[in-house]
């Protein structure tokens, strides 16, 4: 047997060996052994010292921040990274004025002001508010939000931003946090959950993995901020619950036994009852439908939301729309970015734990709309904000 023929066999065997808990620990140890020990984590800030003791453009500053590379006493866009410029703020140079305060904005496309960028962004609104006297006026706002940013992107730019000695870090992210890299052990656990409990069990487990990964990033944010003496403001994203329609490909995953045909018949009966104005019957049928798929279908959850609204139950309508939004996450199907309800809760919990200032968009939007669910007034699509939403 040739080496080429043996490669799949060896790869499968290695995957099996590394798929359990001991394998995960072995991978972590190998990664640690292969990582050079550099200067280590930044030392905690001395409260007796100013928050920004060194000029970031001096010898201790980072060589690269996002797509900007240090050139003398300033950071300019690196031509070698031109293919990435479109993901970042349209700035030739980062504003780093000696003697002024420094606030760094980190985030994803919603923080970039997607659809309005570069004319208007979350960071530009923040800068205008500071200039109008709602905060310190002598502050540079550094827009380091990146479209399509994942956890790795955020952690990388967070480390770079710490080298700029910011006074404040503002993090508006979370819509992309369900894109996680699974370990072999997690993949094995998901396969076992799917085998024993179907898609409902696998989806719940996957969301647990997302929450754990989110918590680790927020812990890193707290440690990094403490190391550079920066205050943290955490912005909890919100989804367009009222007006966004899910992708047509998102219907219902495979159900065991005869549950699939039963689900299809129930869906038709529920829709017929809604069209005929038999609202209470539709509500009962929709409850049965969502019970059949275990909360894995945005279609059944949205039918439940419609029936609840028709019956005047706004609390149930909101609960059903949140279920519809979260249903696709963990089913390994293509869907638009979204913030999970459990991740929103984790962000609130970590803010309390670490003393972050919290900007809770779900609650702010409801307060501004008199309790109404967030919709097109504050959103342009699923998660990107309108002018009023950003403002």
Image (cartoon, helix red, strand yellow):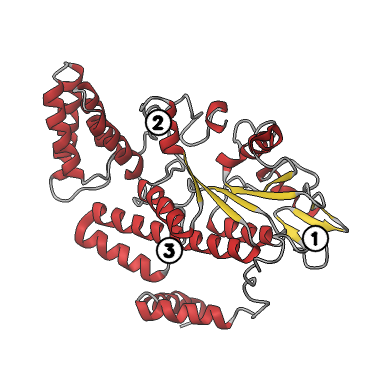
**Which one is in front in this view, the residue at disc 3 or the one at disc 1?**
1
Which residue is disc 2 drawn over?
366
Kindly check if marks 1 and 2 are in contact, taking CB atoms under 8 A apart as contact: no
| Residue at mark 3 to residue at mark 1: CA–CA distance | 39 Å
The disc, 1 or 2, on the residue closer to the chain's N-terminal end is: 1
Give whichever of 313, 49 is nearer the camera. 49
Give whichever of 155, 245 is nearer the camera. 155
Say whether residue 80 is left or right of residue 159. Answer: right
Which residue is disc 3 drawn over?
182
Q: Is residue 154 visible?
A: yes
Q: Quadrant of the C terminus?
A: top right
Q: Is residue 374 visible?
A: no
- Residue 12's x, y, as percent? 40, 75
Say whether residue 186 is left or right of residue 95. Answer: left
| Residue at mark 3 to residue at mark 2: CA–CA distance | 35 Å
Which residue is disc 1 drawn over?
55
Kindly check if marks 3 and 2 are in contact, taking CB atoms under 8 A apart as contact: no
- Residue 183's x, y, as percent? 42, 68
- Classed neighbour count for the residue bearing mark 1: other residues with Cα under 10 Å, few (<14), some (14–19), many (≥20): some
Q: Which mark is residue 246?
A: none
- Residue 329's x, y, as percent? 37, 48
């Amino acid at each position: 047997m040739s080496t080429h023929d043996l490669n799949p066999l060896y790869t499968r065997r290695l995957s099996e060996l590394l798929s359990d808990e001991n394998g995960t620990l072995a991978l972590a140890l190998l990664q640690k052994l292969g990582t050079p020990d550099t200067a280590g984590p930044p030392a905690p800030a001395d409260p007796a010292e100013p928050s920004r003791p060194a000029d970031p453009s001096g010898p201790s500053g980072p060589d690269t921040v996002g797509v900007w590379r240090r050139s003398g006493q300033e950071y300019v866009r690196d031509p070698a990274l031109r293919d990435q410029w479109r993901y970042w703020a349209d700035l030739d140079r980062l504003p780093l004025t000696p003697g002024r305060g420094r606030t760094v904005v980190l985030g994803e496309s919603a923080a970039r002001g997607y659809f309005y960028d570069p004319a208007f962004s979350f960071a530009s609104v923040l800068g205008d508010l500071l200039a109008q006297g709602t905060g310190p006026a002598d502050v540079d706002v550094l827009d380091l939000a990146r479209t399509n940013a994942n956890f790795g992107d955020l952690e990388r730019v967070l480390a770079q931003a710490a080298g700029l000695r910011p006074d404040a870090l503002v993090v508006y992210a979370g819509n992309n946090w369900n894109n996680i890299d699974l370990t072999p052990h997690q993949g094995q656990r998901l396969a076992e959950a799917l085998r024993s409990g179907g898609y409902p069990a696998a989806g719940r487990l996957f969301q647990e993995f997302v929450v754990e990964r989110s918590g680790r990033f927020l812990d890193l944010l707290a440690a990094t901020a403490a190391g550079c003496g920066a205050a943290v403001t955490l912005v909890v994203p919100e989804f367009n619950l009222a007006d966004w329609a899910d992708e047509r490909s998102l219907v219902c995953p495979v159900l065991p036994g005869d549950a699939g045909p039963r689900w299809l018949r129930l869906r038709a009966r529920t829709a017929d009852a809604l069209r005929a104005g038999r609202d209470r019957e539709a509500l009962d049928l929709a409850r049965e439908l969502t019970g059949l798929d275990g909360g894995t279908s945005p279609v059944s959850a949205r039918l439940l939301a419609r029936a609840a609204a028709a019956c005047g139950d706004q609390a149930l309508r909101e609960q059903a729309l949140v279920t519809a939004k979260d249903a696709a996450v963990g089913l390994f199907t293509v869907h638009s970015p979204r913030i999970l309800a459990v991740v929103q809760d984790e962000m609130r919990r970590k803010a309390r734990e670490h003393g972050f200032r919290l900007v809770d968009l779900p609650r702010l939007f409801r307060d501004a709309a008199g309790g109404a669910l967030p919709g097109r007034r504050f959103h342009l699509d699923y998660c990107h904000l309108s002018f009023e939403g950003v403002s």
